[in-house]
Image (tube, rainbow, N blue to C red):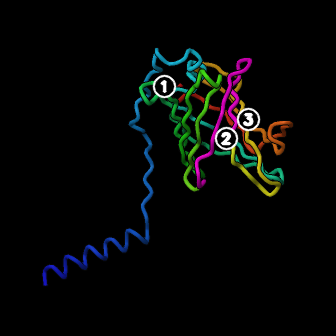
Amino acid sequence: MRYVLVFLVLFATNAVAQDAPVIRYQPDPDTPIGTRNPGAPEQSAQFDFVIGDWDVVITWTGPDGETNTYNAKWHNSWIVDGFVVMQEWRGPYASGSEMRQYYAEEGQWMGFNIYAGWGTPKPTTASFIDGEMLVVIEGASDDRGAFLNRETYSNIEADRWRMHSNRSYDNGETWERGAYEMIATRSGS
């Protein structure tokens, strides 16, 4: 009889857990910031400006022109022995991670973005041009079809920078305003 009760309690607990999953957010991530590996290509320093914890104000603009502005957190650190930048995004509408590494042979950054609910990871490339970091994300689509999403990080200072998005429906031949822009301020500054 005791084994039947234990089984029923375990079964009921498991059934409740399956019906109502608990989502846990990590307000203070324990991932260390890390440092860039001195043996990494010198261009790896181009992404140093994102390293740290950031308070972000992001504004999305819908196709109808309506805007939604909200706050998010961004924790960015060096991982994989200081060769890879990991950017962990935590916001009210999306949570995910972005990994980037500089490849000297290619002359650019390569990586991927993986976010909950996006399906497969999205390949990315990035280049630092004239004081701005340009990140191109593949695999996006909307009612008009597939497009490249380009994020331009600009006005880069030690404790603050901006980013805006553009999109291209013709594989980068022409660009138009994207759906979002943001201002990042170093947490605690």
Q: Residue furthest right?
A: 174
Secondary element type, mark 3: strand
Mark 1 sits on what residue?
A: 83
Side (left or right) of 150 relative to 106: right
Residue closest to the eye, 78 or 125: 125
Q: Which mark is residue 58?
A: 2
Magenta region, residue range: 118-136
Q: Is residue 70 above or below residue 7?
A: above
Residue 72 belongs to magenta span = no
Residue 49 is situated, as x and y percent measured from the top left of the image, at 58, 22
Residue 47 is situated, as x and y percent measured from the top left of the image, at 58, 24
Q: How many neighbours does mark 3 have within 10 angstroms: few (below 14), some (14-19), or many (20 or more)?
A: some
Q: Disc 3 marks which amino acid? A: His
Secondary element type, mark 2: strand
| Nearer-N-terminus badge (1/3) | 1
Mark 3 sits on what residue?
A: 164
